[in-house]
Image (cartoon, helix red, strand yellow):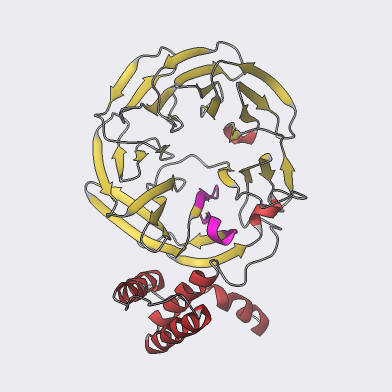
Amino acid sequence: MTEDRVRELLPDQRAPDEAAAQERAWRVVGAAFADREPARRAARPRRLVVAVTAVLALLVAGLTPPGQAVADWLRDAVRPGREHAREALVWLPARGRLLVTSQRGPWIVERDGSKRLLGAFEDAAWSPRGLFVVVTRGHEVIALEPGGRPRWSLARPGRVRAARWSPDGFRIAYQAGDALRIVAGDGTGDRPLATAVAAAPSAWWPGPAHRLAYADTRGRVSMIDGDSGRLLWRSAPAGVVTQLAWSSDGGRLLVVGPRALRQFDASGRLNDVLDMPAGTRAETAAFRPVTHEFALVSHMAAGDRSRLEVVEMSGGNVRRQSLLAGAGRFGGVAWAPDGEWLLAGWEAADQWVFIRTGNGERPTIERLRAVGNISRQFDPGGRGTPQFPGLGEWCCAPVGRPK
């Protein structure tokens, strides 16, 4: 390895337990800020910034190695984001194609970083193996080829959204108003399945049968047979549900709510619950392919901070490993098909952060790459301030037994 290569890799390396040190430092600085003397007047803001910066600089100097965590916090407080971020998305670090939703519509990002806008649609999801994409627009659900050519469409009363393809490609579930509906993969046989459905998209069980999990407006989670409509099981009400996600082996269903995460098995038995601390909201989660680990993004109201961690819940035991923490809000998360790389959106920094994680008992950051100017890259030539894009699935996850 050359000296130049070493210099290139060094900025990505992190000290052991750095994320935890960052959080400890944040608590120290936050407590000091809460105990400060009230300002008598708002004049001379520049002197105040200089004074705070000087105090934090002393703190950084006195804390080693956690001093780097404080330095990161200070940098994020002024300008959130990772240093040495690339200016343009020119590649994906793992095989596959990525779906991205923007204010202009969904895009497909190829491995070489090239991007293709599918059209003025609102939502998008891959078919199995990425052969097609299902999109929604107003009252319509439309099946597209990856190049953007429509294969079929249908319209229904109410706003259509959250279309999701079954693992075998023969069914599509979608929501029209507050109803859950199902249609064959060729656009025929459209019919209703349930009413009073919550906004959280339904989730197909990744097994051989057409079984579908969904949440209703009472916070109950139900599993139904998508062919017959027969109810297989239903949970007790437990507050707002924002997301449903299955592990790739179909053994675990993760139910995400702002205040707690619940984990069921395929028969509907509640196995684990993870309560969020006061003032912390669970934002989104994604199972790592071929494992029972999942990436979790949470947001802490105090200080407007976000955290990305890898979590595994099993039999009442919870293992959590923090990967990234920073100012403002993170966006979505997506695992690469091979499960080695995790992509996290950082809305406050207008960055995507690619993290290569280890596969050991405690996942750690093996490599980190950041790409900036994300919003404008998915709104080329746009006027005004572009919106930060959302992350869809990184196609296509392998099927296998959990590690």
Quadrant of the rendered image containing residue 299: bottom left
Depth check: give the residue in front, 261 or 158.
Answer: 158
**Residue 228 appearing in the image:** yes
Depth check: give the residue in front, 172 or 5.
Answer: 172
Q: Position of residue 402 (x, y in %)?
A: 39, 45
Indicate whether 263 appears above or below 342: above
**Residue 403 appearing in the image:** no
Q: Is residue 369 left or right of residue 241?
A: right
Q: Is residue 199 left or right of residue 108?
A: left
Q: Position of residue 243 (x, y in %)?
A: 41, 38
Q: Position of residue 259 (x, y in %)?
A: 31, 46
Residue at 63% across, 35% down: 130
Question: Which corner quadrant holds the N terminus?
Answer: bottom right
Q: Position of residue 140 (x, y in %)?
A: 62, 21
Indicate whether 23 appears above or below 309: below
Quadrant of the rendered image containing residue 148: top right
Residue at 35% across, 24% down: 223
Tally of numbered tags: 0
- Please say whether residue 280 is one of the residues in the magenta stretch: no
Residue at 28% across, 24% down: 234
- Please say whether residue 349 is one of the residues in the magenta stretch: yes
Residue at 34% across, 36% down: 240
Depth check: give the residue in front, 253 or 140.
Answer: 140
Q: Is residue 65 left or right of residue 397?
A: left
Give the residues in magenta: 331-352
| Residue lying at the far right of the rendered structure | 381
Depth check: give the residue in front, 52 or 170.
Answer: 52
